[in-house]
Image (cartoon, rainbow, N blue to C red):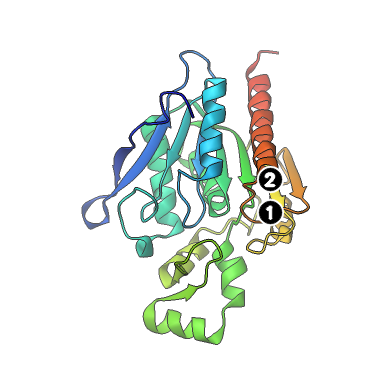
Amino acid sequence: MSDQLSNAQPQFLTVGEGEAAREIATLVRPAQTGNGAPALVWLSGYRSDMSGTKAVELDGLAAELGLACIRLDYSGHGLSGGSFRDGTISRWLEEALAVIRHVAPDRVILVGSSMGGWIALRLAQELARQGGPKLAGMVLIAPAPDFTSELIEPNLKAKERKSLAERGYFEERSQYSPEPNIYTRALIEDGRKNRVLDGIIETGCPVHILQGMKDADVPHAHAMKLVEHLPADDVVLTFVRDGDHRLSRPGDIALLLSAVKGIIRSSTNRQMPT
């Protein structure tokens, strides 16, 4: 990026109290004055952060269109404080809600990748329940709602179950990092409390899902299952035949930005008087 945010320093927001307090790093691009468009909110995946390719490209689109863009690192990720092993969906959801409420845009488009798609869906539920910015749309990239109960628990090996019981976590080799993925008992137990695939998910906004058909982490059937729980909404599901889980190639990024632009146009049309 060549604009003023390319060298911006992150700001930090304290979330939680006492021993649960942690410093959450954010990068917030302000909107051009008076454009009235929704703010873009980036929600990263498990062990990813706000400096990844898709996040940076989304911020670049915001700069091009004069939109606000909100990025954050969950606790235990990127530049934020807190221990990764303390992380749960509830904890990371709390942080995302706190950041959005702190910035306080009128409307938002949630863009969530992998686990970020789960958090986006939970944000939609919590914003509807608690009040807050109006949800103008969602773009979900290889979304992984309920991945702990749907994709991890059914496939646990005996040694992994033993490690969970005895150590409170198990490790799994990562194809994206030399460090293994760590899944804790707390994450899995908390995941059951945050399930969204057990009923109708009322987002009240357009949803565009991008899913690679060669995704080794989140099978494309999982995206199809999610669509079944979004029957009341304007939902588009785009399959990328040779796409992997990350969907970070130039062509994938082009699809992502096109999907976001489509949601922006849709939200602008809905705001126009009839």
Horizontal and vertical percent position of residue 117: 57, 49
- In the shown orientation, is residue 7 left or right of residue 270? left
**Label number found at residue 113:** none
Mark 1 and mark 2 lie on one chain; the one further toward the N terminus is 2
- Front in this rendered view, residue 257 or 82: 257
Q: Which residue is mark 1?
A: 226
Q: Secondary structure at mark 2?
A: strand
- Front in this rendered view, residue 116 or 180: 180
Residue at figure coordinates x 61%, y 39% from the top left = 138
Outermost residue on the left side: it is: 18
Q: Residues within 10 Å of mark 1 (few under 14, many from 20)?
A: many
Residue at figure coordinates x 54%, y 86% from the top left = 158
Query: What's under tag 2, amino acid-wise?
Result: Ile
Outermost residue on the right side: it is: 241
Residue at figure coordinates x 52%, y 72% from the top left = 173
Q: Is residue 127 above or below residue 119?
A: above
Horizontal and vertical percent position of residue 180: 47, 69
Q: Secondary structure at mark 1?
A: helix
Horizontal and vertical percent position of residue 14: 28, 43
- Front in this rendered view, residue 190 or 11: 11
Query: What's under tag 1, amino acid-wise?
Result: Leu
The quadrant of the picture occupied by the C terminus is top right
- In the shown orientation, is residue 242 left or right of residue 166? right
Q: Is residue 179 visible?
A: yes
Q: Residues within 10 Å of mark 2 (few under 14, many from 20)?
A: many
Q: Which residue is mark 2?
A: 209
Q: Is residue 222 above or below residue 138?
A: below
Marks 1/2: CA distance? 9 Å
Q: Is residue 132 visible?
A: no
